[in-house]
C-alpha cells in the first residue's frame, strides 16, 4: 500500500497519547444509557458527536450576538459579522489555504461539490469532456456529475477498486488518468471501505497533465492534518458535522483564480455588488457564492470545533483511528463467517463487514438494543455495493472518544447476534 507523505505524517507511528477518559467527559451525549446499556457510539462516519464547548458556542451566539451578518451597522450585527468572518480565517488556517477568500461556506460537502459541478462545470466543461471519478465515491460525488452529464453531455469515467480489499487500482492509473480527462474528483477516505487514498500523489499526477482536481475530504478533515497546499488540489470539500461541529455547515476550498472565474451558484442577497431590474453584478469572492442569509450561528460554532480538534491534535486523532480500527479488524477476524471490506492495514477509523446469514439491518437493530449505534445499508455507495456484489454492509466507525473496551463490547454483541441467529 503506498501512502503519500502527508498521510504518513498524519498516521504517526506508535501508541496515541490521548487521555480518552478525560476527553469523553467533554461530550455530554456520551454520558447516557441507551436501552439500559452504556451508549457506544460507532456511527461517527455519519456524524460525530459535539463537545460541550461547541454546544456552549451555539448557545452563546443565540443568547448574546444573534443578528444578520454583513448588513447592519449596529453592535450585534458587527459582532456576528466579525465572528462569522473569523471562522473563515480559522478555516483557512485549519487547511492551510493561501487566502481566506478561498473559503466558501456551504451547507456541507454535498453542497460544496454541487457548487463546483454547477459553477465550474457549466463554465469550463463541454459536451464529450471526461470527468474521472473512482468506484468508491459517495453519492454526493457521483450524482452532481450525472446531473451535469444529462445537462451538457460530459462523460463519466471510473477508476476501479480492487475488490473487497478496497484499494484503488493504481497499477493501471495511466490507463485512466489521461490527458483527455478534464477533472479528477475523488474521495480522500472511503466512508465504506476505510481506504485512505494517496491524495497528494494523485493530485500531483493529475496536475502534471493539466487536470483540475477536487478532493472529497468529508471523512478526513476531522481525522488527520489537512493541508491543501501540500495536497495540491484545486478544490476540496468538507462537512463540519463530521468533525465535532454543527450540522448545516460545510466548506468549499477553491483556488482563488478558479473561484474568480466561476459563475455564481445561487442568486440573491449578499452575493451581489449591484442590482438593476434587468442586470446585476457580483460581489467579490467568496461572497459571490454565499447567497442569502448564511447559517451564521453554526458557522461560528464550527470555529470552536476546529479549535477543539487542534487542541487534541489531529496527528493524535489519526494515530488513534489507525490503532482502534486495526484492533477492531483483528478482533472481528475471530468471528466465523465474517466478510470484511477494506484494506487490512493502514485503514481509517472504521470497519465494514457482513456476517454470514444475518442481514446488516438485523445486526444494527440487535446491536441498538445493547446500546451500540452502528450503521447498516449501502452508506450512499450503491455503485460500490454493486461492484462488491452485496446490497449492504454493517459499519462501525470510530472517533477519538472511542475506546478498545467499547470495541470489545461490540465484538461480544456480534457474537451474541451470531448465536441468536444461529449463524
Ligand atoms: C465520503 C463522503 N463524501 C460526502 C459525504 C456527504 O457529506 P454531507 O452529507 O455532510 O454533505 C459523506 C457523508 O457521509 C461522505 O462520507
Image: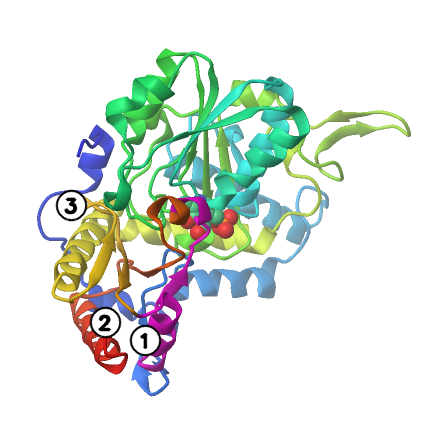
Q: Position of residue 255 (x, y in %)?
A: 48, 23
Q: Which residues are magenta?
A: 358-384
Quarter assignment of residue 39: bottom left
Above or below: residue 398 compared with residue 155: below
User: Is 285 within the magenta?
Assistant: no
Query: Which tag, 2 or 1, sits closer to the chain's start?
Result: 1
Q: CA distance from mark 3 to mark 2?
A: 20 Å
**Is the CB atom of the residue marked by disc 1 within 8 angstroms of ligand 1's nearest atom?**
no
Q: How is the image coloured?
A: rainbow
Q: Quadrant of the N terminus?
A: top left
Query: Which tag, 3 or 2, sits closer to the chain's start?
Result: 3
Q: Are marks 1 and 3 in contact (CB under 8 Å)?
A: no
Quarter assignment of residue 336: bottom left
Q: CA distance from mark 1 to mark 3?
A: 26 Å
Q: Nearer the viewer, residue 79 or 396?
A: 396
Residue 31 in view (yes/no): no
| Residue bearing the label numbered 2 | 410
**Is the CB atom of the residue marked by disc 3 within 8 angstroms of ligand 1's nearest atom?**
no
- The residue shown at (29%, 40%) is 225
Q: Are marks 2 and 1 in contact (CB under 8 Å)?
A: yes
Q: CA distance from mark 2 to mark 1?
A: 8 Å
Q: Quadrant of the C terminus?
A: bottom left
**Is the CB atom of the residue marked by disc 2 within 8 angstroms of ligand 1's nearest atom?**
no
Above or below: residue 45 compared with residue 408: above
Q: Which mark is residue 132?
A: none
- With 252 as the anchor, is 178 left or right in this view? left
| Residue bearing the label numbered 3 | 345
Amino acid at each position: 500500500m503506498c501512502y503519500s507523505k502527508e498521510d504518513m505524517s498524519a498516521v504517526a507511528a506508535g501508541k496515541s497519547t490521548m487521555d480518552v477518559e478525560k476527553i469523553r467527559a467533554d461530550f455530554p451525549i456520551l454520558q447516557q444509557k441507551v436501552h439500559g446499556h452504556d451508549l457506544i457510539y460507532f456511527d461517527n462516519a455519519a456524524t460525530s458527536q459535539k463537545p460541550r464547548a461547541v454546544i456552549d458556542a451555539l448557545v452563546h451566539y443565540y443568547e448574546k450576538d444573534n443578528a444578520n451578518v454583513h448588513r447592519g451597522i449596529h453592535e450585534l450585527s458587527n459582532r456576528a459579522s466579525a465572528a462569522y468572518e473569523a471562522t473563515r480565517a480559522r478555516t483557512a488556517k485549519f487547511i492551510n489555504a493561501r487566502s481566506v477568500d478561498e473559503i466558501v461556506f456551504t451547507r456541507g460537502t454535498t453542497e460544496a461539490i454541487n457548487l463546483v459541478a454547477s459553477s465550474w462545470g457549466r463554465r469550463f466543461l463541454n459536451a464529450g469532456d471526461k470527468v474521472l471519478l473512482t468506484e468508491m465515491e459517495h453519492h454526493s460525488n457521483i450524482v452532481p456529475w450525472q446531473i451535469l452529464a444529462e445537462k451538457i453531455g460530459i462523460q463519466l469515467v471510473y477508476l476501479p477498486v480492487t475488490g473487497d480489499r478496497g484499494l484503488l487500482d493504481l497499477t493501471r492509473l495511466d490507463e485512466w488518468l489521461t490527458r483527455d480527462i478534464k477533472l479528477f474528483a475523488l474521495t480522500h477516505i472511503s466512508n465504506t471501505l476505510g481506504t485512505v487514498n494517496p491524495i497528494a500523489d494523485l493530485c500531483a499526477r493529475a496536475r502534471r497533465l493539466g487536470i483540475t482536481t477536487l478532493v472529497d475530504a468529508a471523512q478526513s478533515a476531522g481525522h488527520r492534518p489537512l493541508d491543501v497546499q501540500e495536497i495540491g488540489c484545486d478544490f476540496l470539500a468538507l462537512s463540519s458535522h463530521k468533525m465535532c461541529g454543527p450540522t448545516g455547515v460545510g466548506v468549499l476550498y477553491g483556488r482563488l483564480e478558479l473561484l474568480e472565474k466561476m459563475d455564481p451558484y445561487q442568486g440573491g442577497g449578499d452575493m451581489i455588488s449591484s442590482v438593476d431590474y434587468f442586470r446585476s453584478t457580483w460581489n467579490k469572492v467568496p461572497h459571490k457564492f454565499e447567497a442569502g442569509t448564511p447559517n451564521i450561528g453554526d458557522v461560528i460554532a464550527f470555529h470552536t470545533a476546529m479549535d477543539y480538534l487542534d487542541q487534541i491534535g489531529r496527528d493524535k486523532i489519526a494515530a488513534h483511528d489507525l490503532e482502534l480500527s486495526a484492533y477492531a479488524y483483528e478482533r472481528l477476524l475471530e468471528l466465523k463467517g465474517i466478510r470484511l471490506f477494506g484494506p487490512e492495514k493502514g485503514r481509517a477509523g472504521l470497519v465494514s463487514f457482513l456476517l454470514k446469514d444475518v442481514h446488516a439491518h438485523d445486526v444494527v437493530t440487535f446491536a441498538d438494543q445493547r446500546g451500540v449505534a452502528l450503521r447498516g445499508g449501502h452508506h450512499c455507495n450503491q455503485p460500490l455495493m454493486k461492484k462488491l456484489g452485496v446490497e449492504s454492509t454493517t459499519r462501525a466507525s470510530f472517533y477519538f472518544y472511542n475506546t478498545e473496551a467499547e470495541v470489545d463490547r461490540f465484538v461480544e454483541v456480534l457474537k451474541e447476534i451470531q448465536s441468536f441467529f444461529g449463524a
